[in-house]
Structure formats: structure tokens, C-alpha cells
Amino acid sequence: MEHKEGLKYQTTGKRKIKKYTTKERMEKINPDNIKIYNKYLNSKKAQNRDVRETTYKVYQSYMNIFMCYIEENWDNFYLLNEDILEEDMLDIMEAYMLFLEDECGNGKKVINTKLSAVSSFYVWATKRRLIQSHPFSGKLDRIKNAQEEKKIAVYFLHQPEIDLIKKELSKPKTSLSKYDYQDEIIWNIAFDSACRIGALHQLSLSNLNMDEMIFKDVREKRGKIVDIPFEGSTKVKVQEYLDWRKEQGIDCDALFYVWKNGAWGRMSKQSLTNRIRKIGEIVGVGDFRPHCIRKSRLNQIGQTGNVQLAKELAHHESLDTTSRFYMEEKSESETLKDISRLMNGNSNPKDKNNLGGEKNESNTWYQGKGKSTF
């Protein structure tokens, strides 16, 4: 990503991304490997129909990398060759980890996920008794501290930045405007609901219930079905957007649309991501991304003292996940102030560990924290 002058970046812009699975390499893969892996895919897709176009599509792309890798570096061996699996597989996988880091520019978390894609195949093969045992389960150490590695930007916006974005996006729309109706709706729904990019991408008019202010039964991460809510102020914006679409003759079930191949269709995740990055420029950020909106919203709710509400909106299984990864860390001085209040008998009602929260009399159920990190 090219850095723009005058904007802040957490990422260097020098991250190496290399497409490895070229058509030429794919054509050289051992055909028996393609055949057995397709058998695995068909089996897993039949068992997990909800994620066959998400999880297993990603796993397939990752396994293609592995099969190209062994074609070039390990004599294109058959994936179920027992002699190779017993004698060399641990060395192969450790070398593969280094290859992913050095040649493909992958970070720790991505490398671990790509190892999981290979491992999943061998778990299946073991259960089917195609091999005697998993060749590296319990033997290969995954990369530690993957969650702590910072390869992507993480921003927590606070109320001044949030207000600035809303003000800019709500300006009258003209042909010369930098931001359009779709940008405004993308921000409002993403922020209100703290939804993932996958859910935002799937929003459709057929799922929209304006009376309840919700998109019902939206499929997101790992095939999970969730509801995507929005607030009253956003409802007004959505109605304006729908009226404008009707005037323009935009006939498409997808909430966020593009004109492609002579018809209206669903906007891609990448296009949504690019629009959100451009929205970040309003507050001087050049590498803003969809997950930053989710983190900002959940952190804002959590800072009111009710992490439980943030967890529920996030659809997290564990409160620990919300607390560890979606709450902004306090500075040492803030921690000391909270300790002083506690020692003086004046506990801080906005302590993020206070799961009960405090009553909010406003017409929304959060209060923004005024401090900015910018």
C-alpha cells in the first residue's frame, strides 16, 4: 500500500506479499495430490455445508501453496506416502514455516493458520485410515506469540474522531463529493453493530427489517448466523439511501452495490475495505481497516463499565476474548489514578472489569471516551 503524505500509518508499507500459486506451478502439482485433496474437500464440505465457501475455500488456497511448495522443493511426493511422512515430514513442515516467513512474507498468525490447513487434511486422512497416524501432530511446535505480532494496523477511535467522521459523511452528496451514500451507510452500520467485514459484505435488502432496525439471519465467520442491528439515527440514513437508490434505478438485493458486467451486483469485500480505508483519512489515518471500526465500537461500550454488553454485540463466545483483544490498554498513569480512587474509597464506575456497568439515561447505550490516541 502506497503511503499518502500527511496521513498517519502504523504499518510500514514494506510488507512483502508474494503470489506463489501461479498457473504454471499449479500445473506441475502431483495429480494424485490434487485427486486426494479434492476427495478431502468433498468430504469436509458435505459435513460442513455452511462454511464450504468460506473456511474450506481458504484452506484449499492454503493447501495449494503447500502442494506447490513440495513440488518445487521436495520432489513432488504423494501426500500420503507413508515413508516420507514417517521419515521427513517434520523437517518438511519446519522448512515450510521458514519458507512462508522468508519467501511469502507471512506473519506468525497466518503461518499458524496455513499449518492448520495442512494438519486438517492429515487429521481427515488418519480418521479414514488412509495413513497410520498424523505425521506431525504433537511433534511440530506452532509459532508462539502469534496474537501479539503487529503486522496490521489497529486503531481505537474515540468520540472526537467518531464525531468528525459522522459529520464529514453526512454532508450533502454531490458529484464532486469525496464520500457518497454508500460510504455513510457502511460507516453507520459497521459502527452501530460492530459487525465483521464478512457480515457487512453479506447485508441484503431481503434481510432488512426497518421496524426492528436489524438485518436478520446474516451469515458471517465460520458460517455463524447473526443479526446485525443499527440505531434510530442510522435508520433515517438507511431510508434516505433506499429512496435515493430507487430514484437512481438501482435494482439489487445487496445493500452495497456495484455495476459490473452490465448488471447491478454485490460490492466485493475488497471494495468495502478500500472505502473504509478512505473513511479513515477523515481523521488523518492512512491504514484504517474494517476491524478498527469493530474494535473502536466494542472498546467504547466496554469503557462504560459493561464488557458483557460488548461481548454480546460482538457475538464472542468468551468474555476473555472481548477483554483481551477489544479493550484498549490503560496507560500506567490511568492505572495509578484508578488505584488512588479505589484506595480512597471512590471506585471507578468505568473500570472495564466492572461487568455490571452503570445506568445510562441517554437514548443510546454507550458513552464515548473523550481521550484520543492520535
Image (cartoon, rainbow, N blue to C red):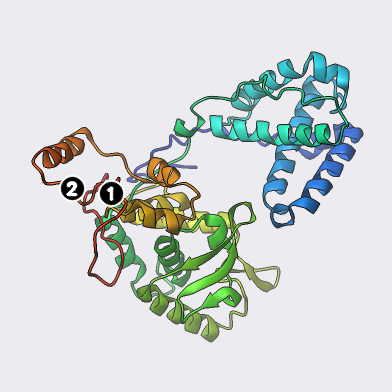
Query: Answer yes or no: do the residues labelled 2 and 1 have beta carbons within 8 Å?
Result: yes
Look at label 1 and name its amino acid. Asn
Circle number at residue 354? 1
Q: Spot the residue most to the left.
A: 344
Q: Element type at marker 1?
A: loop
Residue found at x 87% / y 21%: 82
Quadrant that contains the C terminus: top left
Q: Judge whether 273 appears above or below 216 on screen.
A: above
- Foreground pick, 72 / 320: 320
Res 21 seen here: no
Q: Secondary structure at mark 2?
A: loop
The disc at residue 348 is: 2
Where residue 20 sits: x, y (%)?
Answer: 70, 34
Q: Is residue 317 visible?
A: yes
10 Å crowding of disc 1: few (<14), some (14-19), many (20+): some
> Residue 41: horizontal and vertical position, in percent?
80, 45
Q: Seen in the image, is 69 located left or right of residue 295?
A: right
Query: Could you tell me residue 244's position as x and y percent?
Result: 48, 82
184 to the left or right of 328: right
Q: Residue at x 77, y 26 (%)?
A: 134
Report, in whole angstroms, how far the alpha carbon at label 2 lies from the one at label 1: 9 Å
- Give x and y (percent) for residue 5: 36, 44
Above or below: residue 67 compared with residue 242: above
Residue in the image at 48% along x and 27% along y: 145
Tell which circle, 2 or 1, labels the residue nearer the N-terminal end: 2
List the single residue furthest toward the top. 87
Q: Residues within 10 Å of mark 2 (few under 14, many from 20)?
A: some
**Hey, which quadrant is residue 267 in on the image?**
bottom right
Indicate left or right for 50 with 219 as reference: right
Name the one closer to the observer, 307 or 216.
Answer: 307
